[in-house]
Image (cartoon, grey):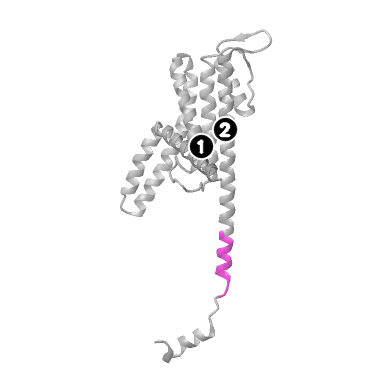
Amino acid sequence: MQRGSCDIILIDSAVKFLILKLYWTSPYRWLDKWQSKLQKRAGSKEDRAKIRRHRYLISECYILGWLGLSLLFLIIDPWLPTLLVYLLMLRVIGILNKESGVVLFGICKITPGQKVSSPARVIILALANYLTAGLLFASLYAKVGSYQLDNSVIISPLTINHAIVQSLSILFTLSPAYTPVDLQTRVLTLSESVFCYLFGILIIATFVNLIRLSSSRSKNRKYNLASASRPTRVHPIYYERVQDPRLQGT
């Protein structure tokens, strides 16, 4: 029993170490680290709150900015080198890595160790990350791979329109719209399916945490209201001691 617990601890430590090391390669991590130091050095509470709001704004701009860049990369994909498109897949790995850190260990976030408290923000940014990954995969399909459009036509690589259809099909159905012909193409489509599957699991876990957090807050609010409306009872002996001047000093 004790050996099993040690194995679990070692696995948790190894996974957490890997997630943190991958997170260090993200440009956003260094920008947020700088903002975090400024927040700690801030003198007043208002200044710290202001910097914290800036950190949230930077996070949102970073995620939405990548969504815009992925759309731009898809438009200019015919003029992009294939190596650059492969390097853009690091963003897909970064998305999955950050969500894993947040859900599993409460790290890789602005408030480490604290539960998420803004459902709308979480949902919108998760959808932006999901679409970003889909557009980046579409750029990859437009560069490499061989696909069978129907029973007779084989195209290598896909056009921009077909690449978007292929990527969105896997993104929302986990099934490719066009059949991969060779092993390399199958690995590419399988990679996007694996990303969608793991990302879906992490988002479901996030929603469960949001529901639990909302439920616990509702219970605490009801308990506080009940405590406030409950009359305060004073013991008669203590009341007499307070009212009698001779007993106030005892």
Q: Tell me, for residue 198, which label it has, or none.
A: 2
Furthest toward the right, the residue is 151
Q: Nearer the viewer, residue 61 or 206?
A: 206
Q: Nearer the viewer, residue 81 or 111?
A: 111
Quadrant of the snapshot with the N terminus: top right
Which residue is at 59% across, 10% downward? 155
Q: Tell me, for residue 100, which label it has, or none.
A: 1
Could you tell me the amino acid type at mark 1? Ser
Number of numbered discs on residues: 2
Q: Quadrant of residue 54?
A: top left
* Mark 2 or 1, nearer chain start: 1
Which residue is at 53% across, 45% downward? 2
In this view, 120 is above or below 73: below
Could you tell me the amino acid type at mark 2? Leu
Q: Overall secondary structure of the magenta stretch? A: helix
In this view, 135 is above or below 245: above
Pointers 2 and 1 in contact (C-beta within 8 Å): yes
- Label 1 Cα neighbours within 10 Å, binned few <14 / some 14-19 / many ≥20: many
- What residue span does the magenta drawing correspond to? 220-231
Quadrant of the snapshot with the C terminus: bottom left
The picture places residue 140, in percent across and down from the top left corner, at 51, 19
Gap between marks 2 and 1 measured at Cα: 9 Å
Q: 52 left or right of 224?
A: left
The picture places residue 130, in percent across and down from the top left corner, at 54, 31
Could you tell me which secondary element the residue under label 2 belongs to? helix
Magenta highlight on residue 228: yes
Could you tell me which secondary element the residue under label 1 belongs to? helix
In this view, 95 is above or below 207: above
